[in-house]
Image (spheres, helix red, strand yellow):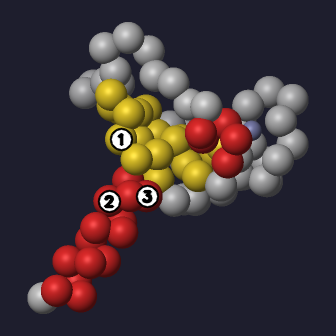
Amino acid sequence: MSASCSRPACQRSPAATLTYDYASRVATVDHLAPSHPMQYDLCVEHTERLSVPNGWSLVDRRIGNVVDLHGQLAS
Ligand SMILES: [Zn+2]
């Protein structure tokens, strides 16, 4: 993970990791992950304000993790 948000002039601590999948045109928000050339760390504010280009979808896997947790409890 980075020391601060990837957006220019933003010094806030990163809260989530953003990954762009150019092949399937999906932008994924995930929990903070170790730095990778295809990933960007964003602070809370920039994660909330995130928008994706036309034709892209935005997936928030942080919500998916909660669902997975419930699945484990149920089984
Ligand atoms: Zn930021």
From mark 2 to mark 3, how far is it between C-alphas? 5 Å
Callout 2, which amino acid?
Gly
Q: What label does residue 62 carry, if any?
A: 3
Query: Does the Cβ of the disc 2 residue fall within 8 Å of ligand 1?
Result: no
In front: 49, or 21? 49
Q: Position of residue 26 (x, y in %)?
A: 33, 31
* Mark 3 within 8 Å of ligand 1, using the beta carbon: no
Q: Is residue 16 visible?
A: yes
| Callout 2 touching callout 3 (CB < 8 Å) | yes
Q: Quadrant of the N terminus?
A: bottom right
Instruction: Name the residue at 47% across, 53% down.
Output: 30
Residue at the disc numbered 1: 59
Q: Position of residue 10 (x, y in %)?
A: 83, 36
Q: Amino acid at mark 1?
A: Val
Q: Residues within 10 Å of mark 3 (few under 14, many from 20)?
A: some
Question: Looking at the image, is 29 positioned above or below residue 9?
Answer: below
Disc 2 + disc 1, Cβ < 8 Å? yes
Give neighbour class at mark 2: few <14, some 14-19, many 20+ (Cα, 10 Å): few
